[in-house]
Image: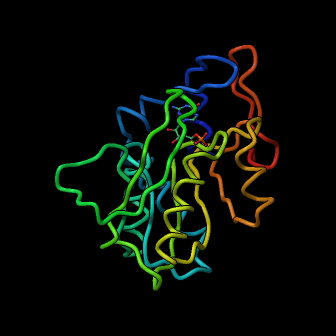
Amino acid sequence: MKLLHDKIMQEGKVLSSSVLKVDSFLNHQIDPMLMKEIGHEFANRFSDQVITKVLTIESSGIAPSVMLGLEIGAPVVFARKRKSLTLSDNLFSSKVHSFTKNETNDISVSRSFLNEDDNVLIIDDFLANGEAVKGLLDIAAQAGAHVVGVGIVIEKGFQNGGKLLREQGVRVESLAIVDSLEDGKVTFAPEADA
Ligand code: 5GP
């Protein structure tokens, strides 16, 4: 997705050979016009599917998910990382190890918002080792929901999450695939460069 590639090249900061900082448009400040285009692109890529729910994880997955939800007319459910006082014990939950924070979080979704009639599209901002997506797949499985695929804003192709998920037969659509962050430079995978 050219607009996203350009934005990453202009504003992305390479923090190390494995971490890309994009907090000027995705992870802290949000660029609504770019998010709108991202929602549109996810809707196009999964236009062959009936989606009844978009499932993501707080907080950075929410903005692109809402734009997609608006586009396809489906509600967005986000897994919470912290226990909320208003979240009862009527929950689906899973454990997710965070690559960037090096901590394990319990994530949870109320049983009221996912069920076996749902066709779910999972969305997240980044795909690294696939832990967050695996947690969301686990929650969807607990609900008996059908997962139509996974939409990722930025996949880091040099980490193994995308490979593991695709080997399991999960359809993964990434709007940008970063091949390398070596020498402080972002290089995109050739097929994502078009
Ligand atoms: P995974 O669970 O696939 O190992 O990592 C994905 C999660 O970790 C995403 O939800 C994202 O919040 C965070 N993450 C992983 N790599 C990066 C990165 O390079 N930059 C930023 N900003 N977040 C990342």
x, y percent for residue 54: 44, 66
Tell me the residue at 55%/70% (across/down). 141
How are the residues colored?
A: rainbow
x, y percent for residue 43: 52, 68
Q: Does 140 sit above or below residue 30?
A: below
Quadrant location, ligand no. 1: top right
Query: Which residue extends farthest top?
Result: 183
Left or right, 122 with reference to 57: right
x, y percent for residue 96: 52, 44
Query: Which residue extends farthest left?
Result: 86
Left or right, 177 with reference to 135: right
Query: Which residue extends farthest front?
Result: 89
- The quarter of the picture where residue 138 lies is bottom right
x, y percent for residue 101: 49, 27
Tell me the residue at 70%/65% (across/down). 170
Tell me the residue at 36%/32% (across/down). 28
Instruction: Tell which of 154 and 87 is nearer to you.
Output: 87
Instruction: Tell which of 160 and 27 is nearer to you.
Output: 160
Q: Does 140 sit above or below residue 102?
A: below
Tell me the residue at 74%/48% (across/down). 192
Query: Which residue extends farthest bottom?
Result: 117
Q: How many marks?
A: 0
Instruction: Tell which of 73 and 128 is nearer to you.
Output: 128
- The quarter of the picture where residue 67 lies is bottom left
